[in-house]
Image (cartoon, rainbow, N blue to C red):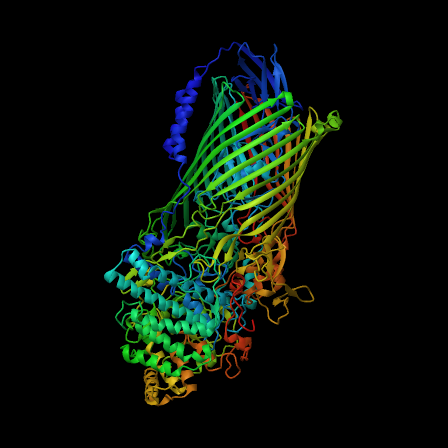
């Protein structure tokens, strides 16, 4: 579907219909507060059953013109419940109860919404009031540590970089473990746009109203083949009608490096080299004491400004946000500028029978990516050398040279030079939009028809320039390259929804059935590469194809039935049938059903009048979800590729391009996860203590593993096949307590805990093949081969290393390992299955204290039994790293403990380097103060102060124990960030 | 209300606008790839597919890697020549792997490999990958397929030659696998690629018979010697491989075939029209494609068009940078910027050359001849001489034209798989081993010719040659060192695993030790044993 058509679809209905103006002749005023008496800003106030509405001001007050006929108002606010209040003469006083206790709160779920009390699945909702605070550059960080069962680990400290998100441990090995993310009804493609570290960085965190996390199959199965790793639904803020409101917020932050890698100083290196180095190395020593880490990191100042305007023009509630972020990385030359514009319109017509929900978001980024090679360089480059020299040959930077001044090859380059001489400029932009049209049939108001058309288009253009004087590319004469990519994803959903309360049988039914079409198209442009002076690299010419156009399509039919009997027994069944272009016709269609039952025990007569128990619900669910991300678009088709110039062949004088058959697997299909979930939701003391416990078992089958093909039977020697199986078992616990709640002080405590046990149960065609060791995971610098393995019987990504032998002083003996199979020689067969990289237990704790006009809170997370391989120790903690083979370098202080020379090939494969990296981290601590009315009452000012990455408690010896792959090497350090913020409401 | 009709109208408009575009099929096809039918629709497409057959002997992959990281982590290791060289040369006195950081080939020189050694699996899977590519080409170029696709006349005739060449390359890979692994799985062009039928394992004898039968059968479809385009092979290659196969027949089948070896090598010598290239030191240079006088068939490498870390580039970079302070000098000598510094020769091998033998092209400056230390880093790389046999320089001492374009990384040196000198040596050895149909005098003359070329400054060069088996084994070492023969030779002479000849670090011991005779064959890799239950491991592993 083209963009043009989409615009048509968006605009045409607006032209066909005209606004519906009502007579208005009465003004109602009032104030909305929470149960503690604090004002609730931006609560929505609507005439019940009508379209007229407004929003409360920062002090909780509102004023609304209503028709004379209006009898009552509906007041709602996200994070709080909804209240209907009769219109009386004089100001209204409205009290909203916090959502924790409000079960009539509406929760956005896939293709519709439901009342929280009607939920049968495992669904978590986090609203803006509970978000993490501070200089948040990417949306998922808003809910880190806030949801049981959801692990969010940032990829590092680069501004705008993404995170690894795992819901209940993920469900895959080789394909994807990332959840499906849906923004205002538009499911995002998993792959981001080139030129941006993270696809989610295109959503302005300030625009987000709430996250809904669908964790179990009964809630997620409505998303079928994309739901096996859970679903995160992001809902952005909408206009609520009423008078014009302005909000301006501004954050200013300073980030510093929190901890540096422990390496040697210039003096220490001089000592080590003088004592142990060859004469040639001693001669190379310089006089400087350069701390290269100090040279590459900086205090980074960032700002984040947002202006939002909301209100209503007649019956057209709107919200417009303009955001501008200027972020600097703590690694010098790392920059991200982001300008975002979001427009939300939610007009309603015909007595609310026809509702529109239109969201348009656009973001432009301007990024300069620092050359992250400098991070590794700074810990390994010789600290006895100065940053700059008087000789300007390599841009004035010190570089290793031969006696004739030419570069010594492959020796590493000056880290500062790497930063300052690389210009990697990317300009990605993205727009996501949708128009949801909901029509409530006039002659049959229980029935809704809902059409949602959406798009997600992005484009990146980028250039990379390295000057011809830069040592990193000196031999090639510098680099001048460019890239371009566009993505066009389109969406159409259409569904009917029928809701009926059948009082005669005390039942309520809610049925949804629909169709969805999703297309994902990428256009990757190919360019020649040029030297800095504009000459082409001879081997790069000419491009064979101007661009490539990979595309995939998903067509789905879905249905859902909710049945509620007497508010006691709830039943949900969903089914989705997906057709994917990634599979052959025989395997293309998959059916994903789910079922769930819940019993609201507190509505039984024996508990109905309990003062202690205010809610008690038992939920059980079962469902099947799929996983097709990470599977190639065309892997099932027998294809030939056209080779490049550099790997063609020469016949006579002619260059003949080679055309090469690809391996393929015609029987490829999706991975399937069956989830069983059992849970109890509870609330005591009028909801001041509430929470839930969920037990789950997730069994994935048809797991894709790369399977060796019997030689000669296929063009690829390993082919992804659906052979494996895996299990995740776990418990999630979530508890909210409000120990103090009065007009002056409120204290909210949220605690969540997740235990997850992952076990790989099969990986081979013939189950439990003893000759198959397992699927190798990531490797480590300075060591050849994988250090992690996913082996049957153990958890995925378990360390698979040699067992170190120690001397009587517990000092590891270099190159000496236990011959575990007792065959007299140390071979790869002597490796053993050790500890797993992923934690088995993680906790989140976030208290919030409100006292008069102050509020104070922090977020702490803890992780247990996550193991990390200290690659800095293994790769740099040895003499030949410092006293060098060709040049002097720097090494990890671990060398002093081991005295390793570095001459053993498999020392890097030692389990000595694996450490328990359990940790407790304070993510965030914040304090806020509501100054109140300023500027003669025209505005309300709130100020806040915040520190991120406050401290980490761990026994792990490296830079940071929190890693998403178990290997600690050259992590972009997560900075400590201090933020002050101002928020003005007009 | 009057709005009903408008709403229904709007819905209808939406449906007509949007729904048809959703009917788009789920059958999507990549834009930049093609199917067999579009590749093989015309003769030019056949030539592209033939280029793949040939380049599978040279590069590590054309569209991504041929050998996946599950088998060999470092792609640079995965080309045919480098894998073959690891098995044939690194296992012997010709070379030891001295760099600790690249673990794939570690243990190969020490004869400590197992069914899970990456370098062993790499050689095995590379061979079968190439065979599968050849099988596919042979299937797609059958007479039936050609007539179905309307290709006839000269075009069809050319493609018949292509097909015979693919059959040869298949036979050559089978020979290499037979030599290395013994009893091996067998798949030919009757196999439906992509089906799940498990290939059978065949005995050494059966594989030998298949190769022999193929080489004889394809002869008619190959073009006459020296009449093909450079880079492509001809009939002489099929005779040369037969000669090599027969010389080793006893190892493969238990039966001597020396008489056939004499016949086949003689056919190359007499009917091929080859002569020894006068200058030995010009054999392995950047412009050695000019050596058509002696080269029978070469794997072609080019700094721009056929780039591979696994080809002759490896044979230049691997030994390079003998001493840190002299890396510039080494670069000047060899014509590359490489400093891999990972291969040295044992002193036992170096000792086979005297000073008058110009084939002993060693880098000695800063080096100690005795290999007292094997595995280490640059600081220990001084133990053992390094090789200068392969140099990316032209006959006139210039850098090749591609040097700048490939930034001094990839070399232009072609690798002669068969050259006339080997045929001389086969002839002489087969005669010495009692084969009939040749003559002692001719055999000795061939050895003298080689000695004279090797010792241009030695007036008694000719008399240094003698028609004895020990002389021939050593002479093969000297003449063909690093050309992928040594392991096969030592096995034929019973010296590979036994204690009758020891070299530094054989069996992992400084002065060398005998090892179990199971090491005469490599083990079938674990992966294939587990995916194909038809396969039985070689004895002892």
In this view, the residue in front, B289 or B42, is B42
Q: Quadrant of the C terminus of chain B?
A: bottom right
Tell me where residue A2 sits by quadrant: top left
In screen coordinates, is A945 left or right of B383?
right
- Tell me, yes or no, if residue B461 can be seen here: no
Image position of A393 with respect to A846: above or below: below
Q: Position of residue A230 (x, y in %)?
A: 56, 40
Q: Position of residue A776 (x, y in %)?
A: 54, 57
Q: Which residue occupies 41% across, 27% down?
A: B14
In this view, the residue in front, A354 or A824, is A354
Tell me where residue A273 sits by quadrant: bottom right
Q: Which residue occupies 60% across, 36% down?
A: A595
Which residue is farthest left?
Answer: B153
Q: Position of residue B451 (x, y in %)?
A: 35, 84
- Tell me, yes or no, if residue A454 can be seen here: yes
Q: Position of residue A284 (x, y in %)?
A: 48, 64
Image position of B338 with respect to A253: above or below: below
In this view, the residue in front, B428 or B510, is B428
């Amino acid at each position: 579907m083209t963009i043009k058509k989409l615009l048509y679809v968006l605009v045409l209905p607006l032209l066909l219909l005209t606004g519906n103006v009502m007579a208005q002749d009465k003004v109602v005023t009032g104030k909305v507060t929470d149960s503690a008496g604090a004002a609730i800003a931006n609560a929505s106030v609507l005439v019940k059953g009508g379209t007229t509405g407004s929003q409360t001001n920062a002090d909780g007050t509102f004023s609304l013109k209503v028709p004379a006929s209006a009898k009552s108002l509906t007041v709602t606010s996200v994070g709080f419940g909804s209240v209907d209040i009769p219109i009386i003469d004089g100001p209204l006083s409205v009290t909203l109860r916090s959502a924790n206790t409000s079960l009539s709160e509406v929760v956005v779920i896939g293709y519709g919404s439901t009342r929280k009390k009607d939920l049968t699945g495992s669904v978590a909702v986090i609203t803006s009031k509970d978000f993490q605070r501070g200089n948040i550059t990417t949306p998922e960080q808003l809910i880190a540590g806030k949801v049981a069962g959801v692990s969010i680990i940032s990829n590092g400290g680069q501004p705008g970089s993404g995170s690894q998100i795992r819901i209940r441990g993920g469900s895959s090995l080789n394909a994807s473990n990332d959840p499906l993310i849906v923004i205002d009804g538009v499911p995002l493609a998993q792959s981001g746009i080139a030129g941006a570290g993270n696809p989610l960085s295109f959503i302005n965190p300030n625009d987000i109203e709430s996250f809904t996390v669908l964790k179990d199959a009964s809630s997620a199965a409505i998303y079928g083949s994309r739901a096996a790793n859970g679903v995160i639904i992001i809902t952005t803020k909408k206009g609520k009608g009423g008078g014009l409101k302005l909000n301006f917020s501004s954050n200013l932050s300073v980030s510093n490096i929190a901890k540096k890698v422990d390496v040697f100083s210039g003096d220490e290196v001089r000592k080590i080299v003088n004592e142990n180095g060859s004469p040639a190395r001693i001669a190379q020593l310089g006089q400087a004491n350069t701390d290269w880490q100090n040279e590459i990191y900086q205090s980074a100042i960032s700002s984040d400004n947002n202006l939002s305007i909301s209100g209503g023009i007649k019956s057209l509630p709107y919200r417009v946000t303009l955001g501008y972020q200027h972020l600097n990385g703590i690694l010098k030359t790392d920059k991200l500028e982001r300008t975002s514009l979001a427009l939300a319109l939610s007009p309603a017509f015909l007595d609310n029978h026809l509702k529109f929900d239109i969201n348009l978001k656009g973001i432009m980024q301007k990024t300069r990516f620092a050359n992250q090679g400098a991070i590794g360089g700074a810990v390994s480059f010789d600290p006895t050398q100065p940053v700059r020299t008087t000789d300007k040959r390599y841009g004035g930077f010190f570089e290793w040279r031969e006696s004739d001044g030419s570069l010594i090859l492959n020796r590493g380059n000056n880290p500062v030079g790497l930063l300052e001489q690389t210009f990697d400029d990317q300009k990605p932009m993205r727009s996501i939009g949708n128009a949801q049209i909901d029509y409530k049939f006039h002659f049959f108001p229980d029935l809704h028809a809902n059409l949602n058309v959406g798009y997600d288009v992005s484009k990146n253009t980028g250039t990379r320039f390295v000057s011809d004087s830069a040592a990193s590319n000196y031999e090639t004469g510098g680099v001048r390259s460019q890239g371009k990519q566009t993505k066009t994803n389109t969406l159409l959903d259409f569904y009917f929804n029928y809701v009926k309360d059948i009082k005669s049988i005390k039942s309520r039914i809610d049925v949804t059935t629909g169709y969805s079409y999703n297309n994902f198209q990428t256009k990757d442009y190919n360019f020649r590469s040029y030297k800095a002076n504009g000459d082409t690299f001879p081997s790069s010419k000419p491009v064979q194809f101007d661009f490539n156009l990979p595309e995939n399509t998903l067509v789905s039919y879905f249905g859902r039935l909710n049945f509620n009997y007497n508010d006691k027994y709830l039943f949900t069944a969903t089914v989705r049938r997906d057709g994917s272009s990634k599979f052959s016709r025989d395997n293309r269609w998959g059916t994903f059903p789910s079922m769930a039952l819940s019993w609201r025990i507190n509505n039984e007569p024996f508990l109905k009048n309990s003062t202690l128990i205010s809610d008690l619900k038992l939920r059980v669910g079962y469902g099947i979800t799929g996983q097709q991300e990470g599977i190639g678009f065309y892997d099932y088709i027998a294809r030939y590729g056209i080779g490049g110039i550099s790997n063609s062949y020469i016949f006579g004088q002619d260059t003949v391009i080679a055309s090469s058959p690809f391996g393929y697997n015609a029987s490829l299909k999706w991975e399937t996860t069956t989830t069983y979930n059992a849970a109890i939701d509870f609330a005591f003391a009028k909801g001041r203590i509430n929470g839930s416990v969920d037990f789950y078992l997730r069994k994935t089958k048809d797991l894709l593993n790369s399977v060796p093909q019997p030689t000669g039977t296929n063009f690829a020697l390993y082919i992804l096949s659906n052979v494996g199986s895996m299990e995740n078992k776990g418990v999630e616990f979530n508890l909210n307590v409000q120990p103090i709640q009065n007009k002056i002080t409120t204290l909210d405590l949220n605690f969540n805990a997740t235990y997850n046990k992952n076990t790989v149960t099969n990986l081979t065609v013939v189950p439990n093949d003893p000759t198959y060791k397992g699927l190798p995971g990531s490797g480590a610098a300075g060591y050849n081969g994988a250090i992690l393995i996913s082996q049957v019987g153990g958890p995925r990504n378990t360390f698979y290393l040699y067992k170190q032998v120690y001397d009587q002083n517990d000092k590891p003996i270099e190159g000496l390992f236990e011959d575990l199979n007792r065959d007299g020689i140390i071979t790869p067969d002597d490796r053993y299955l050790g500890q797993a990289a992923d934690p088995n237990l993680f906790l989140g704790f976030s208290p919030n204290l409100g006292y008069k006009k102050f509020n104070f809170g922090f977020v702490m997370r803890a992780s247990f039994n996550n193991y990390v391989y200290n690659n800095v120790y293994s790769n740099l903690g040895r003499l030949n790293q410092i006293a060098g083979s060709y040049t002097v370098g720097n090494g990890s202080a671990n060398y002093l403990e081991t005295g390793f020379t570095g001459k053993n090939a498999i020392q890097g494969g030692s389990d000595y380097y694996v450490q328990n990296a359990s940790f407790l981290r304070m993510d965030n601590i914040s304090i806020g103060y509501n100054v109140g009315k300023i500027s003669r009452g025209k505005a309300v000012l709130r100020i806040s102060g915040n520190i991120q990455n406050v401290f980490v408690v761990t026994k792990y010896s490296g830079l940071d124990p929190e890693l998403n792959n178990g290997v600690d090497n050259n992590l972009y350090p997560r900075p400590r960030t201090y933020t002050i913020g101002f928020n003005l409401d007009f | 209300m009057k709005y009903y009709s408008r709403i229904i109208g709007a819905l209808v408009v939406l449906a007509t606008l949007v729904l048809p575009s959703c009917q788009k099929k789920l059958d999507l096809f990549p834009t930049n790839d093609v199917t067999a039918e579009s590749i093989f629709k015309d003769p030019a497409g056949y030539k592209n597919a033939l280029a793949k057959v040939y380049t599978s002997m040279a590069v590590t992959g054309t569209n991504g890697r041929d050998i996946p990281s599950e088998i060999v982590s470092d792609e640079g290791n995965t080309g045919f020549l480098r894998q073959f060289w690891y098995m044939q040369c690194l296992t012997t006195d010709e070379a030891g792997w001295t760099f600790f950081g690249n673990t794939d080939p570690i243990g190969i020189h020490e004869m400590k490999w197992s069914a899970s050694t990456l370098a062993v699996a790499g050689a095995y899977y590379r061979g079968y990958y190439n065979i599968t590519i050849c099988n596919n080409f042979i299937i797609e170029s059958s007479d039936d397929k050609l007539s179905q696709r309307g290709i006839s006349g000269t075009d069809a005739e050319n493609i018949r030659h292509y097909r015979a060449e693919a059959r040869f390359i298949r036979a050559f890979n089978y020979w290499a696998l037979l030599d290395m692994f013994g009893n091996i799985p067998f798949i030919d062009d009757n196999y439906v690629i992509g089906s799940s039928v498990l290939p059978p394992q065949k005995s050494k004898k059966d594989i030998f018979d298949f190769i022999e039968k193929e080489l004889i059968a394809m002869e008619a479809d190959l073009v006459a010697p020296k009449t093909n385009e450079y880079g492509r092979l001809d009939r002489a290659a099929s005779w040369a491989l037969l000669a090599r196969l027969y010389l080793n027949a006893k190892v493969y089948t238990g039966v001597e075939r020396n008489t056939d070896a004499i016949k086949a090598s003689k056919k190359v010598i007499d009917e091929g029209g080859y002569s020894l290239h006068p200058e030995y030191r010009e054999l392995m240079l950047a412009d050695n494609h000019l050596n058509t006088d002696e080269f029978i068939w070469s794997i072609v490498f080019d700094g721009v068009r056929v780039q591979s870390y696994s080809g002759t580039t490896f044979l230049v970079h691997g030994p390079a940078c003998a001493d840190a302070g002299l890396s510039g000098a080494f670069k000047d000598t060899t014509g590359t910027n490489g400093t891999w510094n990972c291969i040295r020769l044992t002193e036992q091998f170096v000792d086979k050359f005297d000073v008058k033998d110009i084939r002993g092209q060693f880098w000695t400056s800063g080096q100690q001849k005795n290999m007292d230390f094997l595995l280490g880093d640059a600081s220990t790389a001084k133990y053992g001489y390094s090789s200068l046999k392969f140099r990316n320089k032209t006959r006139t001492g210039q850098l090749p034209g591609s040097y700048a374009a490939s930034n001094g990384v990839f070399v232009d040196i072609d690798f002669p798989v068969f050259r006339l000198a080997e045929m001389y040596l086969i002839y002489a050895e087969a005669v010495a081993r009692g084969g009939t149909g040749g003559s002692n005098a001719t055999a000795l003359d061939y050895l003298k010719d080689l000695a004279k070329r090797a010792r241009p400054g030695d007036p008694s060069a000719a008399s240094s040659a003698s028609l004895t088996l020990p002389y021939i084994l050593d002479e093969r070492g000297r003449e063909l060192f690093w050309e992928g023969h040594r392991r096969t030779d030592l096995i034929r002479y019973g010296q590979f695993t036994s204690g009758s000849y020891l070299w530094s670090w054989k069996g992992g011991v400084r002065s060398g030790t005998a090892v179990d005779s199971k090491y005469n064959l490599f083990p079938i890799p674990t992966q294939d044993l587990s995916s194909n239950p038809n396969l039985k491991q070689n004895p002892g592993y």
